[in-house]
Image (tube, rainbow, N blue to C red):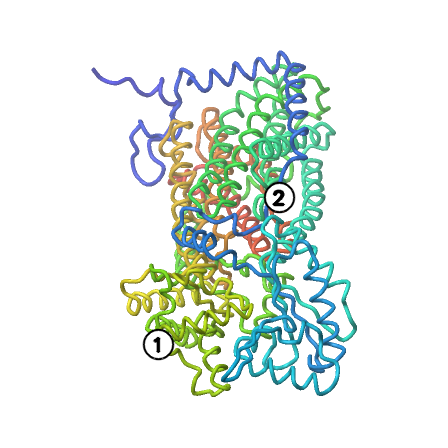
Amino acid sequence: MKRPTSSRLRPKNWPTSFGWGSVSRKWVLMTRIKSPSAFSKAADVAIGWATKHPKTVLLAAAGITAVALAFIPALRVDVDFANYLNRGDPAVIAADQAKARFGSQIRTIVAIEDPQGVFRAETLALVEALETALEDLPEVKDMVGPLSAQVIRGSETSIQIRSAAPKGVAPQTAEEIEAYRDLVLSDSTLLNYVVSPTQKALAIYLEQDPSIDMVTFAAAVEAVVGAHKTEGITFSIAGLPYANLTLQRSMKRDLQVFLPLVILIIVGVLFVSFRWTWGILIPFAVVSLSVLWVLGLMAMTDIPITVLSFILPVLLMAIGIADGIHVLSRYREELRRRRDKTDAILETMKAMKRPVVLTSLTTAVGFLSLLYAYMVPQRTFGLFTAIGILIAMILSLLLIPAILQVVKPPTLKAATSHGRMATVLGAIVRWAIRARAGVLIGALVLSGVFAAGIPLLQIETSQRAYLGDRHPAVLSMDRLDELFSGSNQVMIEVDSGVRDGLKNPDLLNEMVALENFLTTHGVNKTMSLTLVVREMNQRFHADDPDFYVIPDDQSTIAQLLLLFSMQGGSLGSLSLSDFSAGEVMGFHALKTGKEQIALVDDVSDYLDTHFEGLDVQMVGPTRIQASMFTSIARSQLTSLLTSILAAGIIVIVLMRSFSAGIVSMIPLLFTVLFNFGVMAFAGKSLDIATLMISSITIGIGIDYGIHFIERYREERVEVQTRAQALVRAAQTTGTGIVYNAIALALGFGVMMLSAFQGLQNFGFLIAMTMIVSACGAFVVIPSLLAGKQKKTSSP
């Protein structure tokens, strides 16, 4: 039986070509289904109910808001990067196991600089007072400082383990200071560790009580350091706890800047758009409630605020305002056509329900694609931003018509002609239609140029890349790198598998060779059990340098280590108590992810070659950083592909048109290439924030195309030519698209004021891509849809 066509499936005069050849009627962009979908019916019922029962909707919204407000005070803040890691990553698992065996290696470092030299009585007295005050803090579990650090002294008949300064008291006389200086500078353990080679800086290393959170610990240390500030002396604090403290302060400062600015931007855009009090209050209520509900949900589920999700309120306010702008713009349009307010509301929501749902779902999908991300904050940020967007969608469909039903409609002048913006947009679309070949060729050429820059992109996932070179935490780390051996740690766990295995001279000599290898590959200083054994052997032989070696006899090694422990010496994580396993630690100042990956690869190859049959592996922050580098890049590619595929499917299914989905996505793919190209040619690296941009752009940027195509399909029923429909779409829904793009660009643009370099780049690039994506809706989409125009035709 022949399938019916024409009058039932498409409007009269609807073309079967988009300018690139014939297209099957089944896939024609303007296909219209006579019977409404189940979604449409359900939406109509819900919207109709909300319009008939506005007070019930308002009371329900107020009740949910009250519950959310009750939970929000319990919302936690987590700035600890250690909690952001994927616990299933082998590098993280190895680090967790090492921590359980050897204890935490996280240290807070306090550096004291004196440009006149640290070996002065005044400076050493200050260091003594500082060491005493820090050691007295209940938050401090252990401390190693230039005065209290253990040193090995000995002769052929005795060995003594004592503090570098007797009883940790600073030397006072010139003779005492000279003796102390000679001691620490000659000690290979202390040099470039607690005293700088320049003799102008000293360092104190602090281990925190594990029951105290890092931010509290760092704040206590900072307070003590602040109390000892002295003219002419410079203090620097570094380490993960202090970095977390500065992160929390930066987040608070950013929010204090972002929120007022975003609110001001939203109010300004809404005022310019509607010049109606309720036109400002209604969309603002939608985004405010969506923010409060999401924060309440995070508190209920005990999901903390992180260095990424703290911008969630700003994002939701910038993104969520879009639906309100489009709905109220259409409401004003419908009010001019009919006098009855209820009819205007219902007609508005009938026309807007599908684009509102489509744009919200595609935007949510862009954020949900971050569930594939490596880091926990990226996943929670994506999930709860998506939830907030869906909440804003529901409120736009139910709360907006409910409020409109109970408030007085705006007084509107009869529209005698299109406004200036609509006129300009119409002119732009006419130009795009006339110059469609040039537009499409130009878009292809630019896409090729931007795509050519992609191989130049650098990925950098370190804290430094996100924080920026001028952040206080990074400045402190850089200063420590300059003064000492480096603020980054490399740790290698050596497990012999047997009791007293680390007393084997062959194994210890292999460890010495490993340390020599590390120092030729970017590691500035190493520490291990071999250091103690060689130093004990040398001290036992009257400090003869020829005996700074590992003894050949295991029993001699055992006696030296027994004597060391009997004298009160502490090995810390250098060895377990049964000497079955220990750690080789190194300090380096390698800054980029590529440098650290190269170190990890070189060390791994060395371990495989020289420690065959033994359980020896690299653990700790350097290995984790290298793993993050590769895992984040891979996961973000998955997120990008997922967001593109999912957004396309959603548009195709809900628009019930394959062509509509493809046309909506084409300008967006150009925008993604634009984003990558700009970053590449500007020399910007992809960090944990900017890596998310493309996935997010797919979700947000497609909104403009959806609104434009939806209105085009509606106008195409009323007019004779595609050109006329395109121009009318630009002159009607185009205004809402422009204001939406402005709100998003400015809303994201405020992040350029962030204390974090990663967020500065994130805000700038998202703002740029929103403008480019909106331009694509007015230029590329009309060029694609216009088809070949006859010279005599009038647009």
Residue 570 or residue 206, whichever sits in front: 570
How packed mark 1 is, by other alpha carbons closer than 10 Å (few <14, some 14-19, many 20 or more), is few
Residue position marked by numbered label 1 in the rendering: 553
Q: Nearer the viewer, mark 2 or mark 1?
A: 1
How far across and how far down the image is residue 728, in percent?
53, 33
Q: CA distance from mark 2 to mark 1?
A: 55 Å
Q: Amino acid at mark 2?
A: Val
Q: Which residue is mark 2?
A: 77
User: Tag 2: Cα neighbours inside 10 Å, few (<14), some, or many (≥20)?
Assistant: some
Could you tell whether 109 is left or right of 561 in the image?
right
Q: Work out whether 43 lies above or below 560.
A: above
Specify the amino acid type for callout 1.
Asp
Compared with 287, 464 (above or below) is below
In the foreground, 93 or 527: 527
Residue 238 lies in what quarter of the image? bottom right
Q: Quadrant of the N terminus?
A: top left
User: Which badge, 2 or 1, comes first in the chain's sequence?
Assistant: 2
SS category of the residue bearing label 1: loop
- Give the vertical position of 740 relative to 573 (above or below): above
Q: Residue at x 36, y 18 (%)?
A: 7
Expressed as whole percent of the image width and height from the top left, the position of residue 140 reads 64, 57
Q: Give coordinates of residue 96: x percent, y percent.
A: 45, 51
- Could you tell me residue 770's position as x and y percent? 54, 46
Residue placed at 72% from the left, 43% from the top? 260
Residue 493 appearing in the image: no
